[in-house]
Image (cartoon, rainbow, N blue to C red):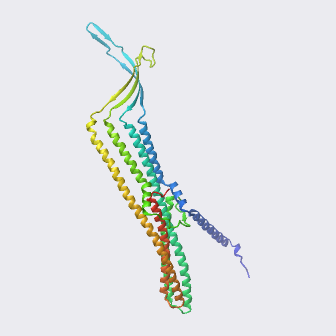
């Protein structure tokens, strides 16, 4: 009898090598996928810091500040003296160069050279303080641009917090789903044993299996939401889009609460929009003063020096050039502005009134916003307390029906319904805690204290 050793078969070796190569390829692909989809645990403070550092919106706000500073520097430059210098050469050809005056005649040269150089310097001494008002206005506008950055930063931080809590809500929902699937699996095993013993019907087993399918469907929706929220948060934080973010814990929902009026007072003292409204009013005041300055006289000083040379050499010897120098003061007054400027002043005063009205509207809007966010947070805390009570009730009801089901007193439908109620109450509590945490940060944002 002949025995064949498969290890010496070249086809067999080739097949084994192919299998090893395929396994190695799959392992490499798995490692590559794992590397590209790195998991990262992120605290809220880390997320805020990272998001602020990588925010494109804040970088744009910084460019607006830089532009406002540049405009302010330009306004300062307007008060500096102006000067200019020039030097030119011209040559004249005179083909007909003879003039006759009766018996006398006068002859010009066939050609002539001329050099003309000028140097001038002027300084506005007084222009109704318009330059001063321009500097002060642009300085105020620079402060407004800085407050725009503060407002933008508050909004960016709030967007990060909102996305962070939304991800936390989804992850907590997934934990509840996993816990309930494990519980339902135990119930399915138990019902199958009861079915095999003839205690329950096949329909009872199907009821628990149907309940498990419904929970799994909920889990699919949560996973889809997690991917969307996770992707959006990665964009906000400037992280690779494949990063899988995990949240261990968020701050407790219940925070020490003060009276509503204290939150409103804090908002009126800290909101950048109100500070900007005050600055806009000051800009309007400067504009009124600048328009009124149109009726005032102006005074300027100027100095000029000239070089006029007629020799071929641009730096000739004495006697072939002159250098006149002039220094003077110029006073001017557009007195027609006394009767043409009054409507411009009236328009500037209307703009000042609009600034006051806009501030009043902003104050009312902020009060309404703070009140709404305050009431929302109070309501969120109340929901948590009610849901904690409902979970205790649903848990007790679930235990009773579980005992009844084991004793064959309650049906599988009643048992599954009790478990579903408990499951829903658990999810609602986790969502309510996250909503309360976000509501607290929303209240902080409305008071202007989110980044302070």
Query: In the drawing, does residue 330 fall left or right of residue 184?
Result: left
Count of number-bearing discs: 0
Please state the horizontal and vertical placement of residue 104, each as a whole percent of the image. 28, 7
Query: In the drawing, does residue 124 fall left or right of residue 245?
Result: left
The picture quadrant where one finds residue 383 is bottom left
The answer to whether residue 392 is above or below residue 289 is below
Task: Identify the residue shown where x is 49% and y is 60%.
Answer: 160
Query: In the drawing, does residue 452 fall left or right of residue 268?
Result: right
Q: Residue lying farthest right?
A: 1
The answer to whether residue 292 is above or below residue 178 is above
The reply to whether residue 407 is in sight is: yes
Q: Residue lying farthest bottom?
A: 198
Please state the horizontal and vertical placement of residue 430, each as a whole percent of the image. 50, 72
The reply to whether residue 423 is in sight is: no
Task: Identify the residue shown where x is 43% and y is 33%.
Answer: 80
The front one of 449 and 36 is: 449
Please state the horizontal and vertical placement of residue 47, each as a whole percent of the image. 53, 60
The front one of 109 and 1 is: 109
- In the picture, the quarter occupied by the N terminus is bottom right
The answer to whether residue 100 is above or below residue 368 is above
Task: Identify the residue shown where x is 26% and y is 38%.
Answer: 340
Please state the horizontal and vertical placement of residue 34, each as a whole percent of the image. 58, 65
The front one of 4 and 295 is: 295
């Amino acid at each position: 009898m002949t025995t064949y050793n498969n290890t010496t078969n070249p086809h067999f070796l080739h097949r084994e090598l192919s299998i090893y190569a395929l396994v190695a390829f799959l392992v490499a692909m798995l490692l590559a996928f794992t590397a590209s989809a790195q998991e990262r645990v992120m605290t809220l403070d880390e997320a805020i810091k990272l998001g602020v550092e990588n925010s494109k919106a804040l970088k744009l706000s910084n460019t607006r500040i830089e532009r406002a500073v540049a405009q302010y520097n330009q306004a300062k430059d307007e008060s500096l003296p102006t000067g200019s210098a020039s030097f030119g050469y011209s040559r004249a050809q005179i083909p007909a160069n003879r003039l006759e005056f009766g018996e006398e005649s006068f002859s010009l040269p066939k050609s002539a050279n001329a050099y003309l150089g000028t140097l001038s310097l002027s300084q506005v001494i007084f222009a109704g303080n318009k330059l001063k008002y321009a500097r002060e206005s642009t300085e105020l506008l620079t402060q407004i641009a800085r407050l725009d950055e503060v407002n933008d930063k508050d909004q960016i931080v709030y967007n990060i917090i909102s996305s962070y809590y939304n991800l936390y809500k989804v992850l907590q929902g997934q934990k509840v789903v996993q816990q309930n699937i494990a519980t339902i699996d135990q119930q399915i095993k138990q019902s199958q044993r009861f079915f095999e013993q003839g205690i329950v019907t096949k329909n009872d087993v199907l009821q628990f299996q149907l309940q498990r399918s419904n929970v799994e469907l909920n889990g699919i929706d949560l996973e889809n939401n997690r991917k969307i929220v996770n992707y959006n948060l990665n964009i906000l934080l400037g992280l690779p889009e494949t990063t899988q973010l995990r949240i261990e814990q968020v701050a407790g929902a219940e925070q020490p609460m003060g009276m509503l009026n204290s939150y409103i007072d804090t908002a009126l003292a800290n909101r950048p929009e109100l500070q900007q409204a005050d600055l806009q009013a000051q800009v309007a005041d400067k504009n009124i003063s600048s328009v009124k300055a149109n009726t005032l006289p102006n005074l300027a000083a100027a100095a000029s020096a000239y070089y006029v040379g007629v020799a071929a050499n641009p730096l000739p010897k004495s006697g072939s050039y002159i250098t006149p120098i002039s220094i003077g003061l110029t006073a001017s007054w557009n007195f027609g502005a006394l009767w043409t400027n009054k409507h411009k002043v009236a328009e500037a005063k209307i703009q000042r009134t609009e600034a006051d009205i806009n501030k009043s509207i902003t104050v009312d809007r902020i009060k309404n916003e703070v009140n709404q966010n305050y009431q929302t947070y109070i309501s969120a805390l109340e929901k948590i307390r009610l849901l904690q009570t409902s979970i205790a009730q649903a848990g007790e009801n679930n235990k009773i029906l579980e005992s009844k089901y084991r004793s064959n007193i309650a049906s599988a439908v009643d048992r599954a319904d009790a478990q579903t109620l408990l499951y829903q109450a658990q999810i609602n509590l986790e969502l309510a805690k996250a909503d309360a945490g976000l509501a607290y940060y929303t209240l902080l944002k409305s008071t202007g204290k989110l980044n302070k």
